[in-house]
Amino acid sequence: MDFKLSAADLEVQARARAFSEQHLFPNEIACDERKLTKEKLAEIRQQVIAHKLNGYIHSKTDGGQGYTPMQQILVAEEIGKATCGMWTVVWKASTPLRRGTQWQRDTFLLPFNAGKGRSCFAITEEGAGSDPSLVKTSAVMRNGKWVINGEKWFVTSADASTVVIVHAHVDGDAAKPTLFIVDMDQPGVKIKRIPQFMHSYLYEHYEMVFDNVEVEDNRRLGEVGQGFDLTKEWFTETRVEIAAHCLGAAIRATEIANDYAAGRIQFGKPIRDFQAIEFMLADMAVEIMAAKSFLYRVGAELNEGMDPKLMHAKASALKLYNSEMAGRVVDKALQILGGRGYMRENPVERLYRDVRVDRIWEGTSEIQRVIIAGQIKKRGLGIYTGWTA
Ligand SMILES: Cc1cc2nc3c(=O)[nH]c(=O)nc-3n(C[C@H](O)[C@H](O)[C@H](O)COP(=O)(O)OP(=O)(O)OC[C@H]3O[C@@H](n4cnc5c(N)ncnc54)[C@H](O)[C@@H]3O)c2cc1C
Protein backbone atom coordinates (compact mmCIF):
# COMPACT_ATOMS: atom_id res chain seq x y z
CA MET A 1 0.00 0.00 0.00
CA ASP A 2 1.35 3.38 -0.98
CA PHE A 3 -0.19 6.18 1.05
CA LYS A 4 1.99 8.92 -0.43
CA LEU A 5 0.60 11.61 -2.69
CA SER A 6 2.69 11.86 -5.87
CA ALA A 7 4.74 14.95 -6.73
CA ALA A 8 2.09 15.82 -9.35
CA ASP A 9 -0.69 15.47 -6.72
CA LEU A 10 1.18 17.75 -4.32
CA GLU A 11 1.67 20.34 -7.04
CA VAL A 12 -2.06 20.39 -7.91
CA GLN A 13 -2.92 20.57 -4.19
CA ALA A 14 -0.54 23.50 -3.62
CA ARG A 15 -1.91 25.36 -6.62
CA ALA A 16 -5.54 24.90 -5.50
CA ARG A 17 -4.62 25.93 -1.94
CA ALA A 18 -2.88 29.08 -3.16
CA PHE A 19 -5.93 29.98 -5.26
CA SER A 20 -8.29 29.49 -2.33
CA GLU A 21 -6.18 31.39 0.20
CA GLN A 22 -5.22 34.26 -2.09
CA HIS A 23 -8.37 34.74 -4.17
CA LEU A 24 -11.34 33.25 -2.30
CA PHE A 25 -10.63 33.85 1.42
CA PRO A 26 -10.06 37.63 1.04
CA ASN A 27 -13.41 38.04 -0.76
CA GLU A 28 -15.61 35.97 1.53
CA ILE A 29 -17.02 38.80 3.63
CA ALA A 30 -17.94 40.79 0.51
CA CYS A 31 -19.64 37.67 -0.81
CA ASP A 32 -21.48 37.11 2.49
CA GLU A 33 -22.67 40.73 2.43
CA ARG A 34 -23.58 40.45 -1.26
CA LYS A 35 -21.09 43.18 -2.09
CA LEU A 36 -18.78 41.26 -4.39
CA THR A 37 -18.43 43.47 -7.47
CA LYS A 38 -18.61 42.21 -11.06
CA GLU A 39 -15.06 43.46 -11.56
CA LYS A 40 -13.78 41.46 -8.57
CA LEU A 41 -15.63 38.36 -9.73
CA ALA A 42 -14.09 38.73 -13.20
CA GLU A 43 -10.67 39.05 -11.56
CA ILE A 44 -11.22 35.84 -9.55
CA ARG A 45 -12.37 34.06 -12.70
CA GLN A 46 -9.13 35.05 -14.40
CA GLN A 47 -7.27 33.46 -11.50
CA VAL A 48 -9.27 30.24 -11.95
CA ILE A 49 -7.69 29.99 -15.40
CA ALA A 50 -4.27 31.14 -14.22
CA HIS A 51 -4.31 28.38 -11.57
CA LYS A 52 -5.48 25.78 -14.13
CA LEU A 53 -8.65 24.91 -12.24
CA ASN A 54 -11.48 25.47 -14.74
CA GLY A 55 -13.23 22.25 -15.75
CA TYR A 56 -11.06 20.43 -13.20
CA ILE A 57 -13.27 17.32 -13.15
CA HIS A 58 -13.02 16.86 -16.92
CA SER A 59 -10.48 15.19 -19.19
CA LYS A 60 -8.35 17.26 -21.56
CA THR A 61 -10.39 15.97 -24.53
CA ASP A 62 -13.50 17.35 -22.82
CA GLY A 63 -11.83 20.73 -22.32
CA GLY A 64 -10.81 20.08 -18.71
CA GLN A 65 -7.48 19.78 -16.94
CA GLY A 66 -7.02 16.01 -17.25
CA TYR A 67 -6.54 15.59 -13.49
CA THR A 68 -6.77 12.14 -11.92
CA PRO A 69 -9.75 11.47 -9.59
CA MET A 70 -7.40 11.87 -6.61
CA GLN A 71 -6.23 15.26 -7.89
CA GLN A 72 -9.85 16.34 -8.39
CA ILE A 73 -10.52 15.43 -4.76
CA LEU A 74 -7.51 17.49 -3.64
CA VAL A 75 -8.79 20.51 -5.58
CA ALA A 76 -12.32 20.15 -4.15
CA GLU A 77 -10.92 19.87 -0.61
CA GLU A 78 -8.88 23.06 -0.98
CA ILE A 79 -11.60 25.18 -2.58
CA GLY A 80 -14.11 23.68 -0.11
CA LYS A 81 -12.26 25.56 2.65
CA ALA A 82 -13.72 28.81 1.30
CA THR A 83 -17.00 30.02 2.78
CA CYS A 84 -20.22 31.20 1.07
CA GLY A 85 -19.95 28.40 -1.48
CA MET A 86 -17.25 30.41 -3.22
CA TRP A 87 -15.84 27.13 -4.58
CA THR A 88 -18.57 27.40 -7.22
CA VAL A 89 -16.60 30.16 -8.94
CA VAL A 90 -14.36 27.32 -10.16
CA TRP A 91 -16.64 26.43 -13.05
CA LYS A 92 -17.04 23.09 -14.75
CA ALA A 93 -19.57 21.80 -17.26
CA SER A 94 -22.32 19.55 -15.84
CA THR A 95 -21.06 15.98 -16.16
CA PRO A 96 -23.91 14.57 -18.35
CA LEU A 97 -22.73 16.89 -21.14
CA ARG A 98 -19.85 14.44 -21.60
CA ARG A 99 -22.38 11.96 -22.90
CA GLY A 100 -23.75 14.41 -25.45
CA THR A 101 -23.60 14.25 -29.24
CA GLN A 102 -20.64 15.77 -31.06
CA TRP A 103 -22.67 18.96 -31.61
CA GLN A 104 -23.59 19.14 -27.90
CA ARG A 105 -19.97 18.58 -26.91
CA ASP A 106 -18.77 21.32 -29.27
CA THR A 107 -21.57 23.75 -28.41
CA PHE A 108 -21.75 23.25 -24.64
CA LEU A 109 -19.17 20.97 -23.02
CA LEU A 110 -15.98 22.46 -24.48
CA PRO A 111 -16.91 26.17 -24.27
CA PHE A 112 -18.37 25.75 -20.75
CA ASN A 113 -15.16 24.21 -19.47
CA ALA A 114 -13.28 27.10 -21.07
CA GLY A 115 -15.52 29.57 -19.19
CA LYS A 116 -17.73 30.64 -22.11
CA GLY A 117 -21.21 29.86 -20.83
CA ARG A 118 -22.31 27.68 -17.95
CA SER A 119 -24.94 25.05 -17.18
CA CYS A 120 -27.17 24.52 -14.17
CA PHE A 121 -29.21 21.40 -13.44
CA ALA A 122 -32.95 21.37 -12.70
CA ILE A 123 -34.42 18.17 -11.28
CA THR A 124 -36.23 19.16 -8.07
CA GLU A 125 -39.82 20.43 -8.09
CA GLU A 126 -42.30 21.48 -5.45
CA GLY A 127 -43.72 17.93 -5.31
CA ALA A 128 -40.57 16.01 -6.31
CA GLY A 129 -37.53 16.11 -4.03
CA SER A 130 -35.96 12.87 -2.85
CA ASP A 131 -38.24 10.96 -5.22
CA PRO A 132 -37.59 12.25 -8.77
CA SER A 133 -40.17 9.83 -10.22
CA LEU A 134 -42.73 12.40 -8.99
CA VAL A 135 -41.43 15.01 -11.45
CA LYS A 136 -44.36 16.69 -13.23
CA THR A 137 -42.35 18.63 -15.83
CA SER A 138 -43.23 17.09 -19.18
CA ALA A 139 -41.74 17.11 -22.67
CA VAL A 140 -44.03 16.33 -25.56
CA MET A 141 -43.01 16.09 -29.23
CA ARG A 142 -45.19 18.46 -31.25
CA ASN A 143 -44.57 19.43 -34.90
CA GLY A 144 -40.98 18.14 -34.75
CA LYS A 145 -40.07 20.03 -31.57
CA TRP A 146 -40.07 19.13 -27.87
CA VAL A 147 -42.47 21.29 -25.88
CA ILE A 148 -41.50 21.52 -22.22
CA ASN A 149 -43.90 22.55 -19.45
CA GLY A 150 -43.30 22.55 -15.72
CA GLU A 151 -41.77 24.25 -12.71
CA LYS A 152 -38.38 23.62 -11.10
CA TRP A 153 -37.14 24.57 -7.65
CA PHE A 154 -33.72 25.32 -6.14
CA VAL A 155 -31.89 25.71 -9.48
CA THR A 156 -28.40 26.44 -8.19
CA SER A 157 -26.27 28.98 -10.07
CA ALA A 158 -29.10 29.65 -12.54
CA ASP A 159 -28.20 33.37 -12.48
CA ALA A 160 -24.67 32.55 -13.67
CA SER A 161 -25.80 30.06 -16.33
CA THR A 162 -26.50 30.30 -20.03
CA VAL A 163 -28.33 26.96 -20.20
CA VAL A 164 -30.36 24.85 -17.81
CA ILE A 165 -30.40 21.06 -18.08
CA VAL A 166 -34.02 20.12 -17.42
CA HIS A 167 -35.01 16.69 -16.12
CA ALA A 168 -38.47 16.07 -17.65
CA HIS A 169 -40.78 13.12 -18.26
CA VAL A 170 -41.50 12.52 -21.93
CA ASP A 171 -45.29 12.47 -22.45
CA GLY A 172 -45.58 12.86 -18.66
CA ASP A 173 -44.52 9.20 -18.34
CA ALA A 174 -42.31 8.53 -15.29
CA ALA A 175 -40.78 5.60 -17.20
CA LYS A 176 -39.31 8.08 -19.72
CA PRO A 177 -37.19 10.52 -17.69
CA THR A 178 -35.15 12.57 -20.16
CA LEU A 179 -32.73 15.51 -20.05
CA PHE A 180 -33.01 18.60 -22.26
CA ILE A 181 -30.54 21.44 -22.72
CA VAL A 182 -32.56 24.68 -22.63
CA ASP A 183 -31.21 28.20 -23.16
CA MET A 184 -31.89 30.46 -20.19
CA ASP A 185 -33.01 33.30 -22.46
CA GLN A 186 -35.40 31.20 -24.50
CA PRO A 187 -39.08 32.31 -24.77
CA GLY A 188 -41.15 30.61 -22.07
CA VAL A 189 -38.26 30.25 -19.58
CA LYS A 190 -39.27 32.38 -16.59
CA ILE A 191 -37.82 33.14 -13.18
CA LYS A 192 -40.63 32.71 -10.69
CA ARG A 193 -38.84 33.57 -7.47
CA ILE A 194 -35.34 34.00 -6.06
CA PRO A 195 -35.64 32.56 -2.54
CA GLN A 196 -32.97 33.19 0.09
CA PHE A 197 -31.31 30.41 2.09
CA MET A 198 -29.36 29.83 5.28
CA HIS A 199 -26.00 30.07 3.52
CA SER A 200 -24.78 33.09 1.54
CA TYR A 201 -23.99 31.30 -1.69
CA LEU A 202 -22.05 33.12 -4.39
CA TYR A 203 -24.93 32.67 -6.86
CA GLU A 204 -28.73 32.20 -6.56
CA HIS A 205 -31.03 29.18 -6.43
CA TYR A 206 -33.95 30.08 -8.73
CA GLU A 207 -37.47 28.79 -8.87
CA MET A 208 -38.17 28.54 -12.60
CA VAL A 209 -41.18 28.04 -14.82
CA PHE A 210 -41.04 26.40 -18.25
CA ASP A 211 -44.08 27.58 -20.16
CA ASN A 212 -44.43 25.88 -23.55
CA VAL A 213 -40.68 26.05 -24.12
CA GLU A 214 -39.87 24.65 -27.56
CA VAL A 215 -36.55 22.92 -28.22
CA GLU A 216 -35.19 21.05 -31.22
CA ASP A 217 -34.45 17.34 -30.85
CA ASN A 218 -30.72 18.12 -30.94
CA ARG A 219 -31.22 19.58 -27.41
CA ARG A 220 -32.18 16.16 -26.01
CA LEU A 221 -29.23 14.95 -23.90
CA GLY A 222 -29.01 11.16 -24.12
CA GLU A 223 -31.85 8.89 -25.11
CA VAL A 224 -35.50 9.21 -24.15
CA GLY A 225 -35.74 7.38 -20.81
CA GLN A 226 -32.01 7.76 -20.02
CA GLY A 227 -32.47 10.86 -17.89
CA PHE A 228 -32.35 9.17 -14.52
CA ASP A 229 -29.17 7.22 -15.35
CA LEU A 230 -27.42 10.41 -16.45
CA THR A 231 -28.67 12.24 -13.35
CA LYS A 232 -27.37 9.37 -11.20
CA GLU A 233 -23.92 9.70 -12.78
CA TRP A 234 -23.98 13.40 -11.90
CA PHE A 235 -25.02 12.62 -8.31
CA THR A 236 -22.23 10.07 -7.92
CA GLU A 237 -19.55 12.56 -8.88
CA THR A 238 -21.00 15.48 -6.96
CA ARG A 239 -21.34 13.35 -3.81
CA VAL A 240 -17.59 12.70 -3.84
CA GLU A 241 -17.02 16.40 -4.48
CA ILE A 242 -19.27 17.37 -1.54
CA ALA A 243 -17.38 14.93 0.70
CA ALA A 244 -14.16 16.73 -0.27
CA HIS A 245 -15.65 20.20 0.32
CA CYS A 246 -16.82 19.05 3.76
CA LEU A 247 -13.37 17.76 4.62
CA GLY A 248 -11.85 21.11 3.65
CA ALA A 249 -14.44 23.00 5.69
CA ALA A 250 -13.79 20.84 8.77
CA ILE A 251 -10.02 21.28 8.49
CA ARG A 252 -10.24 25.05 8.18
CA ALA A 253 -12.62 25.34 11.14
CA THR A 254 -10.38 23.12 13.27
CA GLU A 255 -7.25 25.07 12.41
CA ILE A 256 -8.96 28.32 13.43
CA ALA A 257 -10.26 26.80 16.67
CA ASN A 258 -6.89 25.23 17.50
CA ASP A 259 -5.05 28.55 17.05
CA TYR A 260 -7.64 30.39 19.10
CA ALA A 261 -7.55 27.83 21.91
CA ALA A 262 -3.77 28.29 22.18
CA GLY A 263 -3.96 32.10 22.48
CA ARG A 264 -7.16 32.72 24.41
CA ILE A 265 -6.45 33.11 28.13
CA GLN A 266 -9.23 32.65 30.67
CA PHE A 267 -8.83 31.84 34.37
CA GLY A 268 -5.08 32.38 33.98
CA LYS A 269 -4.33 29.84 31.24
CA PRO A 270 -4.92 29.14 27.56
CA ILE A 271 -8.36 27.59 27.11
CA ARG A 272 -6.77 24.62 25.36
CA ASP A 273 -5.45 23.57 28.77
CA PHE A 274 -9.02 22.94 29.95
CA GLN A 275 -9.79 19.32 29.30
CA ALA A 276 -13.26 20.20 27.98
CA ILE A 277 -11.60 22.15 25.15
CA GLU A 278 -8.71 19.81 24.39
CA PHE A 279 -11.06 16.82 24.26
CA MET A 280 -13.14 18.66 21.65
CA LEU A 281 -9.98 19.31 19.62
CA ALA A 282 -8.97 15.67 19.97
CA ASP A 283 -12.37 14.48 18.72
CA MET A 284 -12.25 16.93 15.82
CA ALA A 285 -8.77 15.77 14.76
CA VAL A 286 -9.80 12.12 14.87
CA GLU A 287 -12.99 12.75 12.91
CA ILE A 288 -11.00 14.57 10.22
CA MET A 289 -8.40 11.82 10.10
CA ALA A 290 -11.12 9.18 9.54
CA ALA A 291 -12.90 11.28 6.90
CA LYS A 292 -9.68 12.04 5.03
CA SER A 293 -8.55 8.40 5.12
CA PHE A 294 -11.89 7.30 3.69
CA LEU A 295 -11.94 9.98 1.00
CA TYR A 296 -8.36 9.44 -0.14
CA ARG A 297 -8.85 5.68 -0.18
CA VAL A 298 -11.77 6.15 -2.59
CA GLY A 299 -9.61 8.58 -4.58
CA ALA A 300 -6.89 5.93 -4.91
CA GLU A 301 -9.47 3.30 -5.91
CA LEU A 302 -10.93 5.68 -8.51
CA ASN A 303 -7.43 6.28 -9.89
CA GLU A 304 -7.20 2.53 -10.43
CA GLY A 305 -10.56 2.49 -12.22
CA MET A 306 -13.27 1.55 -9.75
CA ASP A 307 -16.39 -0.20 -11.09
CA PRO A 308 -19.00 2.62 -11.51
CA LYS A 309 -21.55 0.60 -9.49
CA LEU A 310 -19.15 0.42 -6.56
CA MET A 311 -18.41 4.10 -6.97
CA HIS A 312 -22.12 4.85 -6.62
CA ALA A 313 -22.24 2.75 -3.43
CA LYS A 314 -19.13 4.36 -1.96
CA ALA A 315 -20.01 7.91 -3.00
CA SER A 316 -23.17 7.70 -0.88
CA ALA A 317 -21.22 6.49 2.14
CA LEU A 318 -18.62 9.23 1.65
CA LYS A 319 -21.20 11.99 1.36
CA LEU A 320 -23.11 10.73 4.38
CA TYR A 321 -20.03 10.41 6.57
CA ASN A 322 -18.17 13.55 5.57
CA SER A 323 -21.19 15.87 5.59
CA GLU A 324 -22.24 14.69 9.04
CA MET A 325 -18.64 14.83 10.24
CA ALA A 326 -18.34 18.44 9.03
CA GLY A 327 -21.52 19.35 10.93
CA ARG A 328 -20.12 17.93 14.18
CA VAL A 329 -16.62 19.37 13.74
CA VAL A 330 -17.65 22.88 12.71
CA ASP A 331 -20.14 22.99 15.60
CA LYS A 332 -17.35 22.17 18.06
CA ALA A 333 -15.04 24.74 16.44
CA LEU A 334 -17.72 27.39 16.95
CA GLN A 335 -18.11 26.37 20.59
CA ILE A 336 -14.36 26.69 21.20
CA LEU A 337 -14.43 30.20 19.73
CA GLY A 338 -17.24 31.23 22.09
CA GLY A 339 -19.00 34.47 21.09
CA ARG A 340 -16.42 35.20 18.41
CA GLY A 341 -17.48 32.02 16.61
CA TYR A 342 -21.00 33.42 16.37
CA MET A 343 -19.86 36.58 14.57
CA ARG A 344 -20.48 36.73 10.83
CA GLU A 345 -16.98 38.08 10.29
CA ASN A 346 -15.59 34.77 11.56
CA PRO A 347 -15.13 32.06 8.89
CA VAL A 348 -16.34 29.43 11.36
CA GLU A 349 -19.76 31.12 11.64
CA ARG A 350 -20.05 31.04 7.85
CA LEU A 351 -18.85 27.44 7.61
CA TYR A 352 -21.45 26.50 10.23
CA ARG A 353 -24.19 27.85 7.95
CA ASP A 354 -22.54 26.50 4.79
CA VAL A 355 -22.10 22.84 5.71
CA ARG A 356 -25.71 22.35 6.81
CA VAL A 357 -26.92 22.03 3.24
CA ASP A 358 -24.41 19.26 2.54
CA ARG A 359 -26.70 16.92 4.48
CA ILE A 360 -29.60 17.91 2.20
CA TRP A 361 -28.60 18.57 -1.42
CA GLU A 362 -27.59 15.90 -3.91
CA GLY A 363 -29.59 13.47 -1.78
CA THR A 364 -30.30 13.89 1.93
CA SER A 365 -28.50 11.88 4.61
CA GLU A 366 -31.58 9.68 4.86
CA ILE A 367 -31.50 8.97 1.12
CA GLN A 368 -27.77 8.10 1.34
CA ARG A 369 -28.66 5.60 4.09
CA VAL A 370 -31.43 4.16 1.88
CA ILE A 371 -28.86 3.71 -0.94
CA ILE A 372 -26.23 2.19 1.36
CA ALA A 373 -28.74 -0.24 2.90
CA GLY A 374 -29.87 -1.23 -0.60
CA GLN A 375 -26.26 -1.78 -1.70
CA ILE A 376 -25.60 -3.99 1.34
CA LYS A 377 -28.60 -6.13 0.40
CA LYS A 378 -27.57 -6.28 -3.26
CA ARG A 379 -23.78 -6.64 -3.07
CA GLY A 380 -23.12 -7.76 0.49
CA LEU A 381 -21.75 -5.99 3.53
CA GLY A 382 -18.18 -6.56 2.32
CA ILE A 383 -18.26 -3.62 -0.08
CA TYR A 384 -18.22 -1.43 3.04
CA THR A 385 -16.57 -3.61 5.68
CA GLY A 386 -14.03 -5.40 3.47
CA TRP A 387 -10.87 -4.17 1.76
CA THR A 388 -9.98 -4.04 -1.92
CA ALA A 389 -7.94 -7.13 -2.81
C1 LIG B 1 -29.50 25.31 -1.39
C2 LIG B 1 -30.06 24.20 -2.22
C3 LIG B 1 -29.65 24.05 -3.53
C4 LIG B 1 -30.18 23.05 -4.34
N1 LIG B 1 -29.79 22.96 -5.66
C5 LIG B 1 -30.46 22.12 -6.50
C6 LIG B 1 -30.21 22.13 -7.91
O1 LIG B 1 -29.33 22.85 -8.42
N2 LIG B 1 -30.96 21.34 -8.69
C7 LIG B 1 -31.92 20.51 -8.20
O2 LIG B 1 -32.56 19.82 -8.97
N3 LIG B 1 -32.16 20.46 -6.87
C8 LIG B 1 -31.46 21.24 -6.00
N4 LIG B 1 -31.72 21.21 -4.65
C9 LIG B 1 -32.75 20.32 -4.14
C10 LIG B 1 -32.23 19.20 -3.26
O3 LIG B 1 -31.57 18.23 -4.04
C11 LIG B 1 -33.43 18.66 -2.48
O4 LIG B 1 -33.76 19.64 -1.50
C12 LIG B 1 -33.16 17.33 -1.84
O5 LIG B 1 -33.01 16.33 -2.81
C13 LIG B 1 -34.29 16.92 -0.89
O6 LIG B 1 -35.54 17.09 -1.47
P1 LIG B 1 -36.67 17.91 -0.66
O7 LIG B 1 -36.06 19.17 -0.16
O8 LIG B 1 -37.86 18.03 -1.51
O9 LIG B 1 -37.00 17.03 0.60
P2 LIG B 1 -38.02 15.75 0.70
O10 LIG B 1 -37.68 14.77 -0.35
O11 LIG B 1 -39.38 16.29 0.76
O12 LIG B 1 -37.58 15.19 2.09
C14 LIG B 1 -38.02 15.75 3.33
C15 LIG B 1 -37.47 14.87 4.45
O13 LIG B 1 -37.95 13.51 4.29
C16 LIG B 1 -36.85 12.63 4.22
N5 LIG B 1 -37.14 11.51 3.32
C17 LIG B 1 -37.60 11.55 2.05
N6 LIG B 1 -37.68 10.31 1.55
C18 LIG B 1 -37.23 9.46 2.50
C19 LIG B 1 -37.05 8.04 2.58
N7 LIG B 1 -37.30 7.24 1.55
N8 LIG B 1 -36.57 7.52 3.74
C20 LIG B 1 -36.28 8.32 4.78
N9 LIG B 1 -36.42 9.67 4.78
C21 LIG B 1 -36.90 10.23 3.64
C22 LIG B 1 -35.69 13.46 3.71
O14 LIG B 1 -34.44 12.90 4.03
C23 LIG B 1 -35.93 14.78 4.43
O15 LIG B 1 -35.45 14.70 5.73
C24 LIG B 1 -31.14 22.16 -3.81
C25 LIG B 1 -31.54 22.30 -2.48
C26 LIG B 1 -31.01 23.30 -1.69
C27 LIG B 1 -31.48 23.44 -0.26
Image (spheres, helix red, strand yellow):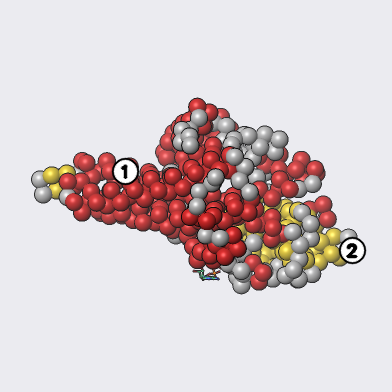
Closest to the observer, 332 or 40: 332
Quarter the C terminus occupies? top right
Q: Is ligand 1 within 8 Å of the beta carbon of the residue shown at mark 2? A: no
Q: Report crowding for label 2: few under 14, some 14 to 19, many 20 or more residues within 10 A (C-alpha).
A: few
Most extreme residue toward the left is 268
Q: In the image, what residue type sits under mark 1?
A: Ile
- Residue 87: x and y, percent? 51, 44
Apparent side of residue 112 relative to residue 76 in the rendered image (left or right): right
Q: Quadrant of residue 229?
A: bottom right
At numbered mark 1, what does the secondary structure look like: helix, strand or loop? helix
Q: CA distance from mark 1 to mark 2?
A: 61 Å
Which residue is at 72% across, 70% downward?
Answer: 174
Residue that label 2 marks: 143
Front disc: 1 or 2: 1
Against 161, residue 23 (above or below) is above
Say which quarter of the image contains residue 224: bottom right
Could you tell me the amino acid type at mark 2?
A: Asn
The residue at 28%/48% (across/down) is 282
Q: Residue at x 53, y 65 (%)?
A: 373
Tag 1 residue: 256
Where residue 165 appears, x then y in whole percent?
69, 55
Helix, strand or loop at disc 2? loop
